[in-house]
Image (spheres, grey):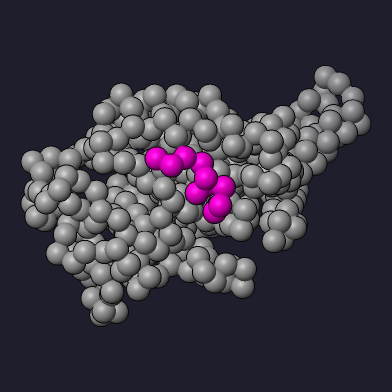
């Protein structure tokens, strides 16, 4: 599987970098050649294009072999590739539209088109600079606390504070210092419960000397009714056979729920917490059939009639609660992540449709009575970029409906 990721990303990145070299670097070489050797410039920009092309594949390699230096270098190169490619593509697209409008209006003056090109080029250079600086700035920011209130039917408390964490992506880039800051920030909120809904790590613990130490501070999370976690797709990507026992042994105060239900709260004032397995296991069924998400298996320990919170990494799994499917159990609230809020524009568009027209924030499932809250995540994957998204620690106050 790792070779498939590496080869696929190398292919896509190579196409993108060829496009960048032809459409951006070549004109830039022509301008700079007035001041220095054109041959030297071509070598420099070809090497740069090659490094950019190799960056995404090398990032995957760093995930498998726990190289912090390689991860940081390739992640930033991936970021540079993206902040060049998307504005350049936007410029080309707007230029194509301008030429088509000009053709339809039957305007043929070459001088007029030259002015349009200069205006569009200037506009997209400015937008590109904003996009690049804004993306790296947002990506480097520590998660902020996002507060919201969600009503729950028959909640036996005047209010219950829960913290939702997701998409930490601890691995070759984000390390122990990030986890320590995150735990300290969460504990300051004094929550009643803490839920971590997947994509906790990006390294296989059997191939990493650091991941156990990096994640150890999660054992210091403090909540009145306990802390719980579920799997995400990245736990499966790096090797669920090793990751599952590793997470189970991480801390006795942070149980991993896989298609199972537990109760939290005071005596006589309990809630169900259902931990659903990861949706991506459907893509890995040959290796992980026992990890396929199952409401039927999750019935074990479930008490009908209690208010129920479901933990699912991918929000699209709310479709399992469609009344037409006669689900084995029900949920008042699903807490999810996975999307990163798109992380970097324009990925929001594809993620929105992949996740049943959900991206981030609070939704009401249209075919049932379940609310869905999607966190944009505490960490990031790949380049340290965010644009039209922000990392968050979700502080959710549950109140009676």
Name which residue lies at 48% across and 30% down. Answer: 217
Is residue 228 in sight in this rendering? Answer: yes
Q: Nearer the viewer, residue 212 or 283?
A: 212
Q: Quadrant of residue 173?
A: top right
Name which residue lies at 45% across and 24% down. Answer: 181
Does 198 appear above or below 364? Answer: above
At which x and y percent is residue 116? 54, 40
Name which residue lies at 8% across and 51% down. Answer: 401
Q: Quadrant of residue 86?
A: top right
Q: Nearer the viewer, residue 284 or 157?
A: 157
Q: Nearer the viewer, residue 114 or 84?
A: 84
At which x and y percent is residue 133? 52, 27
Q: Is residue 247 magenta?
A: yes
Name which residue lies at 20% across and 53% down. Answer: 271
Is residue 126 in sight in this rendering? Answer: no
Q: Which residues are magenta?
A: 244-253
Q: Is residue 304 magenta?
A: no
Does 9 appear above or below 318? Answer: above
Q: Is residue 23 left or right of residue 249?
A: right
């Amino acid at each position: 599987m790792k070779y498939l990721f590496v080869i696929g990303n190398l292919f896509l990145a190579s196409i993108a970098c060829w496009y960048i070299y032809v459409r951006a670097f070549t004109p830039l070489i022509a301008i700079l050649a007035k001041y220095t050797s054109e041959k030297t410039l071509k070598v420099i920009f070809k090497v740069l294009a090659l490094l950019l092309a190799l960056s995404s594949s090398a990032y995957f390699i760093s995930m498998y072999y726990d190289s912090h230096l390689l991860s940081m270098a390739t992640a930033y190169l991936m970021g540079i590739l993206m902040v060049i490619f998307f504005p350049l593509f936007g410029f080309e697209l707007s230029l194509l539209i301008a030429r088509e409008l000009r053709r339809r209006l039957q305007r043929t003056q070459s001088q007029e088109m030259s002015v349009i090109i200069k205006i569009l080029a200037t506009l997209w250079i400015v937008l590109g600079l904003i996009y690049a600086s804004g993306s790296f700035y947002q990506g480097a920011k520590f998660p902020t606390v996002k507060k919201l209130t969600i009503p729950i039917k028959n909640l036996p408390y005047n209010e219950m504070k829960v913290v939702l964490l997701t998409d930490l992506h601890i691995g070759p880039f984000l390390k122990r210092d990030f986890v320590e800051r995150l735990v300290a920030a969460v504990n300051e909120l004094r929550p009643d419960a803490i839920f971590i809904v997947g994509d906790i790590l990006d390294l296989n613990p059997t191939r990493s000397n650091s991941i156990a130490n990096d994640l150890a501070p999660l054992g210091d999370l403090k909540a009145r009714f306990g802390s719980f976690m579920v799997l995400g797709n990245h736990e499966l990507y790096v090797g669920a056979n090793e990751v599952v026992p590793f997470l189970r042994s991480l801390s006795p105060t942070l149980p991993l729920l896989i298609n199972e239900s537990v109760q939290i709260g005071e005596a006589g004032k309990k809630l169900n917490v259902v931990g659903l397995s990861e949706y991506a296991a459907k893509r890995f069924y040959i290796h992980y059939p026992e990890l396929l998400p199952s409401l039927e298996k999750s019935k074990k320990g479930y008490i009908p009639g209690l208010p129920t919170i479901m933990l699912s990494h991918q929000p699209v799994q709310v479709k399992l609660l469609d009344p037409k499917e006669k689900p084995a159990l029900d949920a008042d609230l699903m807490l999810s992540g996975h999307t990163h809020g798109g992380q970097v524009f324009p990925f929001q568009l594809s993620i929105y449709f992949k996740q049943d027209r959900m991206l981030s924030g609070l939704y009401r499932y249209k075919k049932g009575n379940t609310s869905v809250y999607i966190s944009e995540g505490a960490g990031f994957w790949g380049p340290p970029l965010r644009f039209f998204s922000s990392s968050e620690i979700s502080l959710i106050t549950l109140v009676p409906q």
